[in-house]
Each structure stands twice: as C-alpha cells, then as structure tokens.
C-alpha cells in the first residue's frame, strides 16, 4: 500500500501542475509551438501511466479478495465469515491486527470488533506494498 499511496500523491501533484498550467495559459497551452506544451505532454503521459499502474494494482488486490476502500487512509476490506455470515473484515493502516468487521452492505462506520478468539492469525492483509 505505501507504493500505491505514493502513486496517488504523485497523481495529485501532476493534476495540480496541469491545472496550474491550464489556468495560466488556457487553450494556448495545446499549441505545438507553446513553450510549456512539451511539459504538459509529459505530465499527461505521466498521469496516464500512473493511472494505469494504479488500476492494475487495485485490480490485482481485488483478484485476491481485497477491496481497497481508501488508499490515503490505508483502509481495506476483505471477505470473511463472522457468526456464519459473509462479512468484510476491515483493516486500517496503523492498526496492529485485523480486529474489526462490518456487513458486506455496510461501511467503515458500521464496523464492529471481532471477538478476540475469532481474529485472523496474520496481523494485516497480504498484498503489494
């Protein structure tokens, strides 16, 4: 997840820089002979590359049954069983172990503590960093 958060932070920087250029230059920025045209093209290419990488990484996590809810918060859900019901086990960056769950139709606000005897053995969900 740190790598994914880094990509999101860089996307924000690229967006801000692109927006700044567009606000200052307007449509003139798209002219091939404009002084900042090549910078905008590099930013656009970086945006596309980072977006593709993020989408692929999140899709990979989904294939493993991990739902990324918030990259900045480090919030992920993954399927589990609690009291015979399919639920989302819920983990947030900084928590020492998976200790909460919520109904599949619920959200972070609905999370409840997992009884200690029922907690998963691993301290956090497995996935790319």
Image (spheres, rainbow, N blue to C red):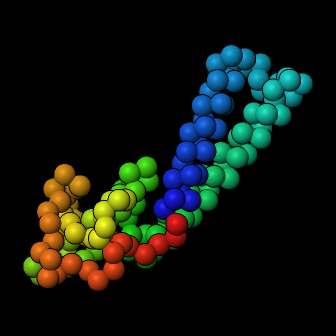
Expressed as whole percent of the image width and height from the top left, the position of residue 70 reads: 39, 53
Side (left or right) of 76 relative to 26? left
Examine the image and state in which quarter residue 120 appears.
Answer: bottom left
The reply to whether residue 97 is visible in this rendering is yes
- The answer to which of 125 and 96 lies nearer the viewer is 96
* Residue at screen point 61% across, 37% down: 13
- The answer to which of 6 and 37 lies nearer the viewer is 6
Residue lying farthest right?
A: 33
Tag count? 0
- The answer to which of 62 and 102 lies nearer the viewer is 102
* Residue at screen point 20% across, 66% down: 100
Expressed as whole percent of the image width and height from the top left, the position of residue 108 reads: 23, 55
Is 55 drawn above or below residue 36 in the view shown? below
Side (left or right) of 55 relative to 27? left
Examine the image and state in which quarter residue 85 appears.
Answer: bottom left
- The answer to which of 93 and 75 lies nearer the viewer is 93
Is 102 drawn above or below residue 37 in the view shown? below
Is 71 drawn above or below residue 101 in the view shown? above
Is 83 drawn above or below residue 1 in the view shown? below
* Residue at screen point 47% across, 72% down: 127
Side (left or right) of 90 relative to 63? left
Side (left or right) of 32 relative to 84? right
Expressed as whole percent of the image width and height from the top left, the position of residue 63 reads: 45, 74
Examine the image and state in which quarter residue 111 appears.
Answer: bottom left
The reply to whether residue 103 is visible in this rendering is no
């Amino acid at each position: 997840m740190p790598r994914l958060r880094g990509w999101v932070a860089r996307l924000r920087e690229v967006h801000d820089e692109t927006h700044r250029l567009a606000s200052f230059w307007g449509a003139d920025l798209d002219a091939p002979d404009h002084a900042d045209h090549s910078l905008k093209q590099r930013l656009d290419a970086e945006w596309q590359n980072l977006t593709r990488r993020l989408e692929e990484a999140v899709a990979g996590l989904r294939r493993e049954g991990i739902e990324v809810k918030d990259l900045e918060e480090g919030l992920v859900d993954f399927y589990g069983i609690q009291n015979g019901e399919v639920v989302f086990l819920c983990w947030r960056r900084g928590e020492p172990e998976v200790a909460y769950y919520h109904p599949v139709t619920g959200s972070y606000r609905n999370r409840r503590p997992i009884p200690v005897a029922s907690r998963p053995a691993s301290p956090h969900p497995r996935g790319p960093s």
